[in-house]
Amino acid sequence: MPNRPRKPFTYSEPTSVVTGAAGFLGSHLVDLLLARGHRVIAIDNLVTGSIDNIAHLAGIPGFKFIDQDVTEFLFLDAAIDYVWHFASPASPVDYLDLPIQTLKVGSLGTHKALGLAKAKKARFLLASTSEIYGDPLVHPQPEEYWGNVNPIGPRGCYDEAKRFAEAMTIAYHKEHRVETRVARIFNTYGPRMRLNDGRVVPAFISQALKNKPVTVFGKGKQTRSFCYVSDLIDGIYRLMMSACDQPVNLGNPSELTVLQFAKEIIRATESKSEIVFKPLPQDDPRQRQPDISKARTLLNWEPKVPLETGLVKTIEYFRAKV
Ligand code: UDP
């Protein structure tokens, strides 16, 4: 038999689809994937995301942007290895404003993204949230905790959509054998958060930079634990590449009260702002701190960036915007 000429060995890059790619987390994820040699198809309908977050990627080989609502059917020609489902309004102010779109993207959007993963035999990662624990009665929150959610309260549209999204993801895993990963993301901060998204980090930093009153809701005794974005995205990548098909908490366990956080922002910005107290929004979780034992053991991951360091970078970003 004659010797056939051998095809030259070609290394094929993995292809990733990122929904919500123009958002805060989505855009940082796209940067990381491109840096790690993935081709990236970025999808966003720009309802809460911003094209500015991915403008620096225009024209880069291996990067493609599609302006689409992920609740619509997703047709893509390419072979796809990974689907990272990040599309959703994520700030309480945004989802209060867009309750139906929030419910739709968490339910119909997750269904479409899972359908795409199934059709392409791709691995799927859901960006879930600490909000699935609601106003938690267990502290810190381990993945085994089922949560304390008010389905018809102002946060219900987000919390229940994400709980549905988790249920749908696990169902696709069980019934269709899709390889799935679920990241429960706790409060994360960093450059590219929207200045007016109403979340505590952009709110306090922009108020402090303008020397305007810093608005603490309630008495500021509620707690949050803030993770810097580069740490979070590293955890997300590790989770996707791991064998872990059960939900994993990703966040920084270092917890502080909102009042302590306001003081820290005033210090870090060298602001003259005073603190003023405003009514606590309904169903605002009183405490939140991730138990990250699972991520430590299964992903060999834990956050590295201290709050002071992360805040310097975040404040620098907002200084140019206010
Ligand atoms: N918060 C505040 N002042 C603000 C914005 C938020 O005191 O101007 C509080 C809010 O009530 C909550 C915490 O900061 O207890 C974090 O709020 P955020 O909207 O960032 O997200 P959440 O963690 O509640 O989803």
Image (cartoon, rainbow, N blue to C red):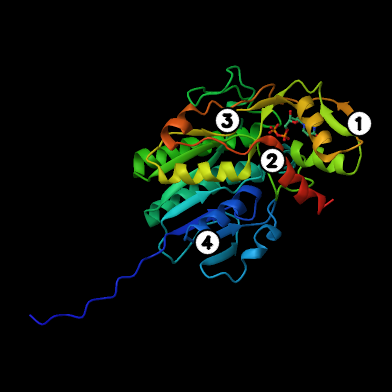
- Specify the farthest residue to the left: 1
Residue 89, placed above or below residue 141: below
Which of the marked residues, 4 or 3, is nearer the chain's N terminus? 4
For label 2, being within 8 Å of ligand 1 is answered no
The residue wearing badge 3 is 132
| Upstream in sequence: badge 3 or badge 2 | 3
Which one is in front, 244 or 43? 244
Where's residue 261, x and y in %?
76, 30
Q: Distance between the Cα atoms at labels 2 and 4? A: 32 Å
Could you tell whether 190 is left or right of 266 in the image?
left
Picture layout, residue 6 above or below residue 146: below
Disc number lying in front (2 or 1): 2
* Rendering quarter of residue 220: top right
Q: Please name the residue that numbered disc 2 is placed on.
A: 309
Q: Earlier in the sequence, mark 1 or mark 3?
A: 3
Q: Residues within 10 Å of mark 4 (few under 14, many from 20)?
A: many
Type of the residue with mark 3: Ile
